[in-house]
Amino acid sequence: MADAKTRRRRWREPSVLPGFGPAFGFTLFYLCLIVLIPLAALIARPWEHGFGGFWHAVSNPRVLAALKVSFGVSLLAAAANVVTGLIVTWVLVRYDFPGRRLADAIVDLPFALPTAVAGIALTAIYAPTGWVGGLLAPLGIKVAYTPVGIWIAMVFVGLPFVVRSVQPVLQDFDAEVEEAALTLGASSAQRWRGVILPALLPALLTGFTLAFARAVGEYGSVIFIAGNMPFKSEIAPLLIITKLEQFDYAGAAAIGVLMLAMSFVALLAINAIQLFLVRRGAPA
Amino acid sequence: MRTLTAKRPASVGAYLLVAAGLSWLALVILLPLAAVFIQALAKGSEAALSALKEPDAISAVKLTLLVAAICVPLNAVFGLAAAWSVAKFDFKGKGLFLTLIDLPFSISPVVSGLVWVLLFGANGWFGSFLEHNHIKIVFALPGLVLATLLVTLPFTARELIPLMQDQGSDEETAAVTLGAGGWTTFFSVTLPNVKWALLYGVLLSNARAMGEFGAVSVVSGHIRGLTNTLPLHVEVLYNEYDFVGAFATASLLAGLALITLILKTGLEWRYAGELSASRRH
């Protein structure tokens, strides 16, 4: 009885290995210094003029417009990444063709390429004088310096998240399930709707979430191609920088806190859907 | 369980699908990469090279290397300490601890820079104290280092933790019960087991440390020759309409990205079994 009590009170299981104290202590100290104290400074800052001050900062029409652009275009980009990412993953996993491993490796390029480099490269391509922008300009389609340009930059940074989320699930997909559907006479569309998509749905949703979260906060690859016109193509992270340059720390922090809160709510909602799908029986 | 193996495309539809997937990759990923190098050479290799020999470009290279040289080792030590405590021991609140380590991934780079200005900027928490004692953090090297430490924090830990959790602690327990000391166990049992994953994490954190733009942009102040890292130097040149200079500098960074990608892919192919499961292809 007493033994059970002490076991319950102990927060760490006993181990013969040494070094938990120093390793855990250092990790916690480093986390506090680099993550927790700075985030506390962020969360504490917007309230220096009370809730009214916070509300005044974030209900400004220009701020609302920037948040709408950031979150709206991020949603559209993540949605596009789910569709194209699924096709790319399917091709990489299911088909054997020359250069397959190379194609697989370059999917990670957006992770490795510095965002400013991607930003100026995309701008050069989609500007009215660029390789692709020059083809679209005579048709009256403007890409660079419009929200479409922002969307292109966000699609670039988000693609690897979807591919790398779906790939392991598709690789481990049980052949017998698919073959059973085939021998039972399911058509190609039926197999997709009934067998393959439900199994991939949680992974697709994870990829969507990661791509969306990255796109919302993205700065470097977006600002060059966005044109940064207030109310049209200005993103929320840029407004934070503008406020800082005017020494409006509370205003900058207010937008930062609101962005964090909105991303957090979005992530919670998607996690809830994820949990629902897993409970319903789809593999995680 | 049996999985389907990849097969050659056999129908017209399959060929079209493969073509569509590869065209998308070429359009979205290869085209921007090619654009960097082609734009850099738009006025010949002489112009591109002379842009890289500018004093401001050289000091940007030095500053970038210095920031990475400080941040990457710290990040590796943090990753090892975090992985040792999470993977080799059981304690309450581990989930929360892991969430905290992953947290920097979900913060916008701009916010990762902003927090340091809120702490150490002129109107920040410690702003007047620092000014009084003539210590510069924001708009100087310490600010760049802190911002880079925040954005790169999860990289090494993320590679080591899943692998070390898979490996368990049996080998270390055996070493310790046979009389080996803590450091001996770590250096001759644990480290050899995770060396490729550690290198993988160092590779990724180095690429991010050298290429980070948003976070350092907030804390740098863009002082030419003093606080501009390579990505910031690219921005300055681009905004001055010096496109050859901007793309020449950008091609240095693109080269770094390519080398990172080649080494990373090499590690995935060669040492697949010694990386965490999600990295095995």
Image (cartoon, coloured by chain):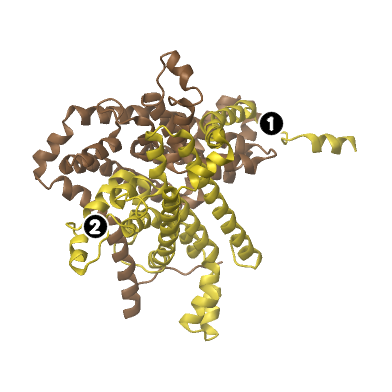
Q: Check the picture and name the quadrant holding the N terminus of chain A.
A: top right
Foreground residue among A128 and A94: A128
Q: Amino acid at mark 1?
A: Val
Left or right of B40? Residue A263 is: right
The answer to whether A76 is drawn above or below residue B155 in the figure is below
Chain of the residue that carries numbered disc 2 in the rendered image: A
Number of the label disc, if any, that sits on residue A139: none
Q: Residue at x 48, y 17 (%)?
A: B129
Badge 1 crowding class, 10 Å Cα cut-off, few under 14, some 14 to 19, many 20 or more, is few
- When asked about the image quadrant of residue A237, the answer is top left
Left/right placement of residue B141 relative to residue A175 reads left
Q: Which chain is yellow?
A: A
Q: Amino acid at mark 2?
A: Tyr
Q: Residue at x 49, y 42 (%)?
A: A57
Asked if residue B152 shows in the view, the reply is no
The residue that label 1 is drawn on is: A16
